[in-house]
């Protein structure tokens, strides 16, 4: 069974940084794109970026570039999303999701269970 | 960025009804369009990919159609378990934008 399991909920203060993990199982991790999505409270999903673990090719949404870093450790089939200089507006659920072999015409399935990040002073 | 616009934003209809949700792209995205279902407190779940391909395990009452700039998601006979929010997403060009969502309720 293909599965993505994310790290647990986090509470952070403004200005701090955070790294969320997404451990993959049930497939060859390096061969599929893996993406990250933000969902703010009561809002729809927002696509943040995507990485191909095999060669670390990474693409970001302009809305998030410079504020987030996507990385991966192939040896443990785990992707990461790092958020820097956190603000209250970063409070959201963050999801990882598996893409396809190719970047074009891809789709995202399955998704991780989500990681709730709360930023509050 | 490609803008994705869904309509309606919310819908309340009776069980057994046929439901149609529309998604429009601000430019042609060929058939690079996916549909997701999200229930409260859960991650989104893929229903349809490439505009009309039903994801494995998804009930056949769900179907998708369209190409270019206009797409539809149809539920042929609404079931109680279909109460959820539905989102379209284009994967034609980065960033892979989502529609704003359609909240579906049963009367």
Image (tube, coloured by chain):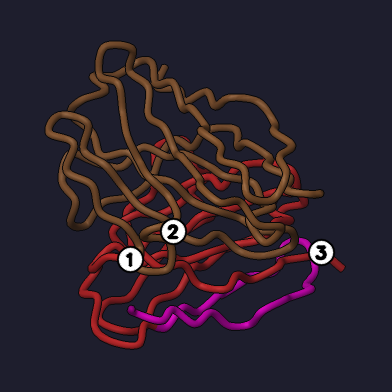
Chain colours: A brown, B red
Tell me the crowding category of disc 1: few under 14, some 14 to 19, or many 20 or more residues within 10 angstroms, Cα based.
Answer: many
Tell me the crowding category of disc 2: few under 14, some 14 to 19, or many 20 or more residues within 10 angstroms, Cα based.
Answer: many
- Contact? badges 2 and 1 (CB < 8 Å): yes
| Sooner in the amino-acid sequence: mark 1 or mark 3 | 1
Residue in view at x 66 percent, y 79 percent:
B9
Nearer to me, A76 or B98: A76
In the picture, the quarter occupied by the N terminus of chain A is top left
Q: Would you say B59 lies left or right of A117 here?
A: left
Which region shows up in magenta?
Answer: B1-24
Q: Percent position (x, y) of residue B5?
A: 49, 82
Residue B95: assigned label: 1
Tell me the crowding category of disc 3: few under 14, some 14 to 19, or many 20 or more residues within 10 angstroms, Cα based.
Answer: some
Q: Percent position (x, y) of residue B4?
A: 44, 78
Find the residue positioned furthest to the front: A15
Q: Percent position (x, y) of residue B60?
A: 48, 49
Nearer to me, A92 or A33: A92
Q: Percent position (x, y) of residue B38?
A: 63, 51
């Amino acid at each position: 069974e293909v599965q993505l399991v994310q790290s647990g909920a986090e509470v952070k203060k403004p200005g701090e940084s955070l790294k969320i993990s997404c451990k993959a199982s049930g497939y060859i991790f390096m061969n599929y794109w893996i993406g990250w999505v933000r969902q703010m409270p009561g809002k729809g999903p927002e696509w943040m970026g995507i990485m191909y673990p095999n060669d670390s090719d990474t693409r970001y949404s302009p809305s998030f570039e410079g504020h987030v870093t996507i990385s991966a450790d192939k040896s443990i089939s785990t992707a990461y999303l790092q958020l820097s200089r956190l603000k209250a507006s970063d409070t959201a659920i963050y999801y990882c999701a598996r893409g396809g072999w190719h970047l074009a015409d891809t789709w995202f399935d399955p998704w991780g269970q989500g990681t709730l990040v709360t930023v509050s002073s | 960025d490609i803008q994705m616009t869904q309509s309606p934003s919310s819908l309340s209809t009776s069980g057994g009804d046929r439901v149609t949700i529309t998604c429009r792209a601000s430019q042609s995205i060929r058939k690079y369009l996916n549909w997701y279902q999200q229930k409260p407190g859960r991650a989104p779940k893929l229903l349809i990919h490439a505009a009309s391909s039903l994801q494995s395990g998804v009930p056949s009452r769900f179907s998708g159609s369209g190409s270019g700039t206009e797409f539809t998601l149809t539920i042929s006979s609404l079931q109680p378990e279909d109460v959820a929010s539905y989102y379209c997403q284009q994967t034609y060009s980065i960033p892979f934008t989502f529609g704003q969502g359609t909240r579906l309720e049963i009367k």
